[in-house]
Amino acid sequence: MHRLAPVALATVLGCATSPYDHAWIARDLARRTGAAAGPQRPADAPSVPRGVSLDDGLTAAEAVALALWNSPRFHADLAQLGFSRADLEEAGQLPNPLLTLMLPVASHPLSFRVQAPLEALWQRGRRVAAAQRDVERVARSLVQTGLDLARDVRLAHADAVLAGERQRVRAEAAATLDAIIEITRLRAAAGDVGDAELESARAEALTARDAALRAEADQQLALVTLRALVGFAADPRPLRAVADAAADPRPDAPAEPVADTVRFALSARPDLHAAGLAVEAAAARAGWERTRIISFTAALDAVTLNPIDGLALGPGLIAPLPIFNQNQGAIGRAEAEIEQTSWRAVALRQQVVAEVTQAHGQLAQARASLARWRAEVSPSLDRSVGHANEQFTAGEASYLVVLDATRRAIDGRLRVVELEADVRRALAQRDRSAGGTPR
């Protein structure tokens, strides 16, 4: 029997620790996004993590890595883990014994009392269990925060790439229309083109030039948003968003059933795990509150009866009688917390299903539209420009026909780059709603 006592004491007084720390969050984010969180200590200037190069332009994956490494707002959120781990440390600590000392005065003898709450020993396990679940809940919630940041960065990167592509198309369109107006001037001088056609060509060229300038300004504004998200808002180093090898890494792959993506999300979403842990933590706190109905305090009294006999020691026990107060209020609050967190978990589960279904539909629509434009619409618009040029050269049509076909072809090129951006955005939303890239 005497051998079991140390084992029981070690179980009660075991270390209040948790594996869910900053390193765990970094590893889980790396598994889900391919990029890890940066160092905990704030730096004077943002740094570039390994594997990221600013010289050849910033891809979406590199932008996510840069944001998780440098974003001050994300690292401020990560500091929440320190609070929950401090709460865990506090939950594992036992209260210090209370010493009461009475000095001898007149006929009152020297006496002292040592008191130690015994209930802290058996309540400690429940307190620690609740705090450990809270630490894990906060850690998984912070992983979700990192996924939200990755999604926002990918959306901003898609906007920056789209703005750059728009600027390129608009600049090429302006150059094309400038060439058209030169040809129109020569034809007007030869008497082949009237003044109306010449003015129409000039108006189209001026409009295209203005659109190119506005597209360049929009590109700079999109880069400002991206720089802020990756933590480079005040850094002078230039950033340039470049598209990945393809807008869609698997454009020809068959679409995965939405039910498979939903199942993956329900098992992978970190905020869903955090919601379940919140219910478990609330249940652990409720159990702890129920144990507080009865409490015992061990006491040891020592009194100096006379100088010859020395101290007289007497052990004792102090316990409040739970007649009027059985800790009903705290127990009621704990039970209400269980109900609240349970309903929140149910609501979040339904929200996840809705988010995944919506993102899946948006991705399917964007992929289908992009495929149609690449295979059918864009080639048809290019052919119409060729036919218009041939008709004008043969004298069978005015140059207004060429301008109209050219304008529609430019709009078609812009539509293609917009659809590519839609696919990138849909992929970002799908991966965030699923808690990572579905496998």
Image: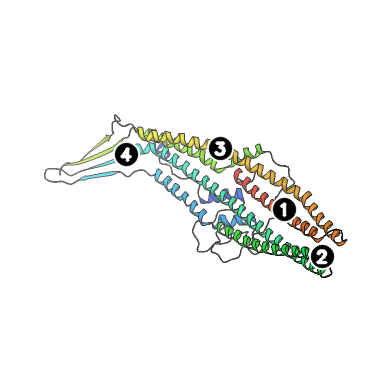
Q: Is residue 292 left or right of residue 384?
A: left
Residue at horizontal 84 percent and vertical 68 percent from the top? 191
Q: Nearer the viewer, mark 1 or mark 3?
A: 1
Q: Residues within 10 Å of mark 1 (few under 14, many from 20)?
A: some
For residue 364, what is the image quadrant? top right
Q: CA distance from mark 3 to mark 4?
A: 42 Å
Q: Which residue is mark 1?
A: 416
Q: Is residue 384 left or right of residue 418?
A: right
| Circle 1 SS class | helix
Q: Which residue is mark 3?
A: 349
Farthest residue, direction right = 394
Q: Which residue is mark 4?
A: 117
Farthest residue, direction front = 195
Residue at horizontal 76 percent and vertical 56 percent from the top? 409
* 140, above or below 55, in the image: above
Q: Which residue is mark 2?
A: 193
If you read the primary sequence from the N terminus, does the residue marked by circle 1 or circle 3 appear first? 3
